[in-house]
Image: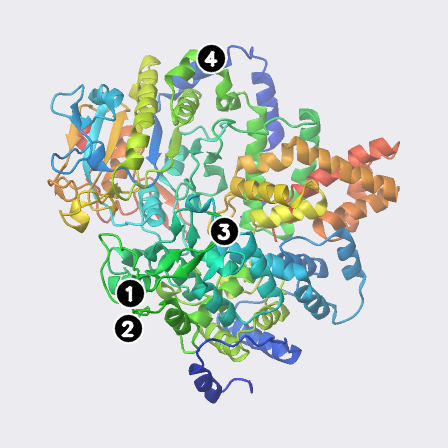
Amino acid sequence: MTRFSIAGAMLSFIVFAPPDAHCQVRSGDVVDTAQFIDQQIDKQLSAANIPASPACSDSDFLRRLCLDLHGRIPTADQARQFLDDTREDKRARLIDARLAHEDYGIWMGDVWLHRLFPERSSQNKVKPGPLREWLTAGFNQNRPWNALSYDLLTGTGEDTHANPAVTVFLNDSGTLKPEEAADLVVPVFLGVKIECAQCHDHPFNELTQDDYWGMAAFFTKLVRDGKGTSETRGLVERVNKKLKLPPYAKEVPAKFLGGAEPELDPDGPYRPTLARWITAEDNPYFARAIVNRVWAHFFGLGIVNPVDDMDDNRPSHPKLLSGLAERFVASGYDMKYLVGSIVNSAAYQRSLRPVQGNEKDAAAYGRKPVRLLTPLELFDSLKTLGIIGNHPPHKLRVERRRFAHFFQAGDDPLDYDRGIPQLLLLMNSKKYNASQFRQVQALVKQLETADTVLEAIYLSILSRRPTEAEHSKMTALLDTTTSRTLTDSATDIYWVLLNTSEFRLR
Amino acid sequence: MNLSHLPCDRRGFLRCTAAASAVSASGWLPALAHAAAAQRGKKSCVLVWLEGGLSQLESFDMKKKYSMFEPIESSVPGIQVCDKLPNVAKLMHHAAVIRSMSTPENEHVRARYHTHTGVRPVPGQVYPSLGSMVAMELGDPDSAIPNYVVIRGKGRGGTGSGSGFLGPKYQPLKIDDIKNGIENLTPPGGMQQFDRRLNLLEEVEAGFYKTLPAKSAFAHLTTLRRASTMMHSKESKAYDLDLEPAKAREAYAGRYGDSFLMARRLIEVGVPFVELSLPEWDNHSGCGLHKENLPPLDIGLSALIKDLEDRGLLDTTLVILMSEFGRGGPARVGTGHKEDRGHWHKAWTTVFFGGGIRGGQIIGKTDETAGIVEERMVNIADYFATICKILGVDYMKENIDPGGRPVPIVVDAQLSPPKVINEIL
């Protein structure tokens, strides 16, 4: 805890634009914070007399980490390598390697792209590609969260290539309306839901219509302008033009959420003032909001839920939330430090399987909460398996979007929200069945014996080897008369594993 | 939860469906429909959901000063509707218009949830939708196809329609692409291969569930079984609109026609609750979206009602037209803003057709802006209780929530008894 001091916090309070120093994860700090997480979780577990499940198996850990950091299951080779690694610190090594891999930034960029640029019918023509790449680079370079946020909140530029951050505020008719911008920014960066305060004072918390329209007022100068086509044209804050608010708006001066009215230069841009307030170290929401979101990414539920409505709801572990937020700020808003601390904790590495007494209350973290693969995780995992064809990137992205749309996941990741049509797709699609056959055919050709084929199928789909019981059960089903019959019968097993809970859940 | 609670063994239904499929395939629908109607004696419901919010001022609560469309006379003297609904106007003798809905939520997701479940959203507990509860009461528990179907449009409709704590067996079947109905019902390797694989899958699942008895694993297996049952059934042909004669398809013209036609086909084979979610009614100012969407609604809705009547199914089928709230304007932001049509939950309109109600009635009254209820306020509990009465469902029937508490269909019915709209029964 030496890194965090009140003096440090005071000092950075007067910094205007957040610094963009390149942060290095220091493994000592990560271990210390992982221990802090476990102390907080364990304290509440023992107070509530809830036992903790043992640590998960290596294959569960590998699968979980790959899904969380890279958005897909590991390959059979990766699984084999990790399971056969006998070094004691192989989990910590794996964490470092996966955090350093470029797929980390690609997946985080994807997750944040969907959050910052949710699919709306009014944004069909704006191309989010540059923003995706910008976010990916930001996460891979481990830019501090306050710096990334500042850039996202204040971006201006000639076109979306010159400054991809502007994309967040664009739509087909120009820019988001002030109230739409506030509805986007406030839940994402501050974890507060303010839509209800649009028309009436917020039902539960202290927010009023003044807070809502006060925040919206910061976005009244957005104008789409610059070079490029309607897909890529940029954004400026026009000095002398104010966007009209809707007739039912409450006309109030720009005001920080639950806070003061800043002095604004009427001739200058408004958003930098807002962004400085949001990313300031003493902002009551900012660090907590990101810590809570990152936590939810790894556990399927936040320390406060829902993650975009933190003001109305209580944290399950108040000290954990505030302690993590403090450490995160002290680390210089270091995302890899935060992520590394969480995935190094025993709480993260606990088994999904309950023991007597911890079956209920997933939010106690006596066991790891069970959740479904999200539609994108499922798609990318199918891609890893070779079930999705080798399309060119553009075509692949279209198919991926269509897949995600067909699965239309609900808000709660712990909820089973698959329906019959979604299961039918994976069971009966001609395309997916044909690819499964081809995958098995290739395995048979390469590996020849029934044993090795079976092992490869288990490693590919479930990231583990078959148990002895599974081994004898399944080998009995394999027909080794010819390589064709072996392929046929092994495809049955492949199909079965692909449709199991074990593959669909994590 | 343990495995013995899982639905009956699959071989059992395989035998049943094999016997049933001996019946000639050509005459399947009339025969099934007949059987379904005869053995039922039970009612069914089509819930037509206008995603975003129908403007009462531009539909069924016309006001001289503020409506942006003209009123026209209907088949019932004294009841006027808007001129974009000429075909529905001719059927108003089947209708009860409730002009005095009043609810507490004014944001889409929250309001959708409230108007589907009867409760306000709270974190941590998901209540079942009325559709799931009615389907549970009226549906055949061994039905080969799901008892609750939600036909979704382009939008993200369908939130709020889940089965909540009733569990995966009562989840609606969601159809997203109406043109294609339910895809992938036929396994590419044939049924024999599918059954062989599914048997093995069941065994693997049972083993997995022993080591990880998670709710989602249970839900996964339940859904697998429901999917398989459907694949084996001939009722699933109801999802195939191409089997409908061309003439019938013509009657169901327009953008929403296929959804309405699908609803009729499902009602006919005995599905007790069908919800159609029609997108893009979130018309915040002016009347552009309504101008575009009311005519196809008029065609589809009137085709459905007439078709049900022709087939003798209207008296046993309640058709409900509703949204998550209405649209404000004058009452919301002041009489100066005639064109504002923002969300408005304090006064809005729903319509019942058929279901054996006494039609040709108006319930409730609003002020000159159609934004304030002046008479006979109807809240969601009153509304749900009335629907249950019409459908012959006991709204005091209790389901058990995860905390072990009994929860009536109309949640607070014991504390504050709902005011059923008896005038229309």
Q: Which residue is mark 3?
A: A228
Q: Is residue B94 left or right of residue B369?
A: right
Q: Label 2 to label 1, Cα distance in Å?
A: 8 Å
Quarter of the figure with residue A64: bottom right
Are discs 2 and 3 both within one chain?
Answer: yes
Q: Amino acid at mark 1?
A: Gly
| Element under disc 1 | helix
Residue A353 visible (yes or no): no
Q: Amino acid at mark 3?
A: Gly
Q: Which residue is mark 4?
A: B31
Does the residue at mark 4 contact the one at mark 2 (Cβ under 8 Å)? no
Q: Label 4 to label 2, Cα distance in Å?
A: 72 Å
Does the residue at mark 2 contact the one at mark 1 (Cβ under 8 Å)? yes
Q: Which residue is mark 2?
A: A261
Q: Amino acid at mark 4?
A: Ala
Are discs 4 and 1 both within one chain?
Answer: no
